[in-house]
Image (tube, rainbow, N blue to C red):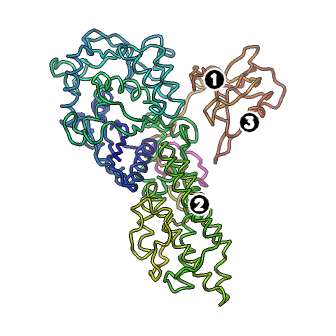
Amino acid sequence: MKYYITTPIYYPNSSPHIGTAYTTIAADAMARLRRMKGDDVYFLTGTDENAQKIVRTAENAGMDPLTYVDGIVDKFKEFWRLLDISNDDFVRTTEERHAKVVQQIFTMLYEKSDIYKSEYEGWYCTPCETFWTENKLVDGKCPNPDCGRNVELLKEESYFFRMSKYSGRLLQYIQDHPDFIQPTSRRNEMIRFIEGGLEDLCVSRTTFQWGIKVPFDPKHVVYVWLDALINYISALGYPDGEKYKTYWPASVHLVGKDIVRFHTIIWPIILMALDLPLPEKVFGHGWFLSKEGGKISKSRGNVQDSFQLIQRYGADPIRYFLLRELQYGMDGTFSEDDLVEKLNSDLANDLGNFVSRTLAMVVKYRNGIVPEPGEDTDLEREIRDLSSKVKQGTEEKMLACDTAAALEVIWQFVSRCNKYVDETAPWNLAKSEDNQDRLDTVLYTFMECIRILGILCAPFMPGVPRKIKPLLGDTDFFKDWEQADSWNVIQPGTAIRKGEAIFPRIDVSAYLEQVNSEMERCVTQVQGNTGHQQEVNLEVSPSQLGNLQQMAEMVPLKEEISIEEFAKMDFRVVKVLQAEKVEKADKLLKLEVEMGGERRTIVSGIAQHYSPEALVGKKVILVANLKPAKLRGIMSQGMILAASQDGELEVLTVQKDLPTGAQVK
C-alpha cells in the first residue's frame, strides 16, 4: 500500500523547539511503522518561508529574508537529524519547484473565475498571518486565544478566492466522510464554522514584495495560506510528476489544532476547485503546554534550548516522552522534571532493566550462548498470545494517530515481560539439576522477548533496536513488523552479551549537584549582566536549571519599580462563591467570586492543585485591575494570587474575617 504522510511546514522565524517537535516525531513514528509493514511510504516536512513575519524578523536581525531563513532552515534540518526523523523530502516554499506550481495553480483558478480581483480592508494579525473582521476582535486585538496581539488596519487591492462557492459541497463531503477530520471534536468544530458561513479568502498582498509573484500581475505576491498549503502537492511534482501520480492523495495531514481550519476548509476547497482528490485524513493534535500554563511557543518565551535537551538525554527519551504524554486530541504538559521521571521509570526501570538482567542471566547461566528451548508452559503461551494482541493493538492505535495509546499497549508487554521474570525465578531454577531444561526455556523466552520489544519500539524509539542488535549476536531482527508476534526466530547457539544499559538511570542526587553548580554559574552571569543582586535557592530541578539558563543567556532580571508604579496595582479581598473545572483544560478552574457586592468570573490555572470544592467559601486575593482576557472562550476578569515552588502551589488566602472588596496594601 502507498502511504503519504505530512507535517505542516514550519515558520523558520527562529530555531525549532520542543513544542514544534511533537508533530514531526509523531509523523516519523507512523511512517516508520508503515515502512516496517512493507508499505510504500513518503514522508514530507519542510518550512513556510514566504510570510510577512519572516520579513519583519529578518529586518530586526539586520539581514535580508533569504539569508536569514537559510540559517534557520539549517537548524531545522539538524534538529530533525538529531531526533532521528526519517523524512523522505524537505520542501521549502522559496524553492523554484514550489513557486512554479503555486503560480500555475493561481493562474488555473483565476482562469476558472474562482479567483477575482477586488479591494480588501480588514484587521490583520502578522504573527497569525490572518485577517479578521472588526466584530471578531477581542478588545481590539487578535481573537486567537494563543495570540491576543495588536492588529493593524490594512486596505489594499487584492485577489480573492471564492471560498463561499464551495461551502455546501465541502460540508456535504465532511458529513459523508466522518474520518476526514479527526478527532471528532475538531470535526464538529469545523462543521459549525462552515455552517456559520464562509467568506471569500484574500489570496494576494501588495504591501510587501517577499513571496511568490502572481504571474500575470507581478505587483501582487501570493498570500501565505494559498502558497503554503500547495506544498503538499508541489513537493510531489504536481501535475505530471511520478511521485504525485503515486502518492496523492495524502493518507494523513498531521497538524496542530490551531491550523486545522486552514487544512480542513481552505485546502480542501482549493483541491475541489482544481478537481483533485482530497486527503484521506487531517488529524489535529493538541498543544504542549508549559507546566506553568500556556502553549509552549517562541512568542511566549517559555521554550528551552531543544538542542541542549537532546544532548542531555538523547533522542529516544525525548521521542518517548512526547509521544506518550500527548493523549488523543488533548493538550499535554512538557517539563524537564517529568521527562527525567519517565526516563527513569519507564525506560530505565521497566524496559532497560528487563533487557539488562535477562541478558546477564544468559551470560551467567549459559556462558552467553542462547540455549535450545524445551517445552512451553502456560506462561510462555500467555506471553506469545499477548505479543500478537500488542502488535495488532499498536497498529490500530497508530492508524488512529494515537501515539500515546499505542505506547501504552506496548508497555503492557513490557510489564508482562518483567512479571514473567519474577514468576519463573531463573535464579532458583539454576540451583537444581532437574530444572535445567526449564531454565533453558525461560532464558530462550527472555531473548525472544527482547527481540520482540526491539521491533515494537523501533517506530517510536529507533535507537532501541540499534542498541539491542549487537547484544543479540549482531543480527538485524528489527526491520519486519510482522516478526513482532513470531517466535523461535533467534537461533539456539547464538552468542549474546550483556553490554551497557540501553537506558542508564539518571542519578537525580548526583545530577542535582551538577545542576546546582551550573545554577551558581548562571546566577553569577545574571548578576553580572544586570547589576542586580538576588537570593536564589540553589536546590533546583532540571527544568528550573533550564529556566535559569535561559534567564542568564536571554532575559535580564526585572528592573526595580517605584512606589508610584506599584500603587497602580489594585489588590482586593474576594470570596469564592462557585468553582468548576474548565472543559477540556486539565489545569484551569473557573471561579465565580464576590467583591464588595460585585460578581466576577476568574479563570485560574490551579486545577492540578485544588479541587473546585476546596476553594468554595474561601477568601483569596485578586488583582482586580488586571485587563480582562479570554481563556478557553471564558472572559477572565482578574488574577488570583498564589505562591509556587518545586511543583507545589498554594493560593494566598485571608484568615481574618475581612469584608470582600477590602483593599490589600
Place residue 92 in its image quadrant: top left
Q: The magenta stretch spans which residues?
A: 521-539
Left or right of 601 in this view: 11: left
Provide the secondary structure element on which disc 3 rests: loop
Q: Position of residue 446 (x, y in %)?
A: 55, 73
The relative height of residue 322 versus residue 300 in the rendered view (above or below) is below
Q: Position of residue 414 (x, y in %)?
A: 58, 62
Q: Residue furthest right?
A: 657
- Between circles 3 and 1, the one closer to the viewer is 3
- For badge 1, the amino acid type reads Gly
- For badge 2, the amino acid type reads Leu
Place residue 255 in its image quadrant: top left
Q: Position of residue 658 (x, y in %)?
A: 81, 24
- Between circles 1 and 2, the one closer to the viewer is 2
The relative height of residue 595 versus residue 21 in the rendered view (above or below) is above
Mark 2 Cα shell of 10 Å, populated few (<14), some (14-19), many (≥20): some
Distance between the alpha carbons at the discs numbered 3 and 1: 20 Å
Residue ID at (57%, 69%): 354
The relative height of residue 539 versus residue 531 in the rendered view (above or below) is below
**Label 3 vs 2, first from the N-terminus:** 2
Q: Position of residue 275 (x, y in %)?
A: 28, 25
Left or right of 141 in this view: 384: right
Distance between the alpha carbons at the discs numbered 1 and 2: 53 Å
Where does label 2 land, which residue?
A: 386
**Label 3 vs 1, first from the N-terminus:** 3
Where does label 3 land, which residue?
A: 611
Where does label 1 land, which residue?
A: 638
Provide the secondary structure element on which disc 2 rests: helix
- Between circles 3 and 2, the one closer to the viewer is 2
Q: Tell me whether the residue at label 1 lies in contact with that at label 2, contact meaning CB atoms closer than 8 angstroms.
A: no
Place residue 606 in its image quadrant: top right
Q: Is residue 405 magenta?
A: no
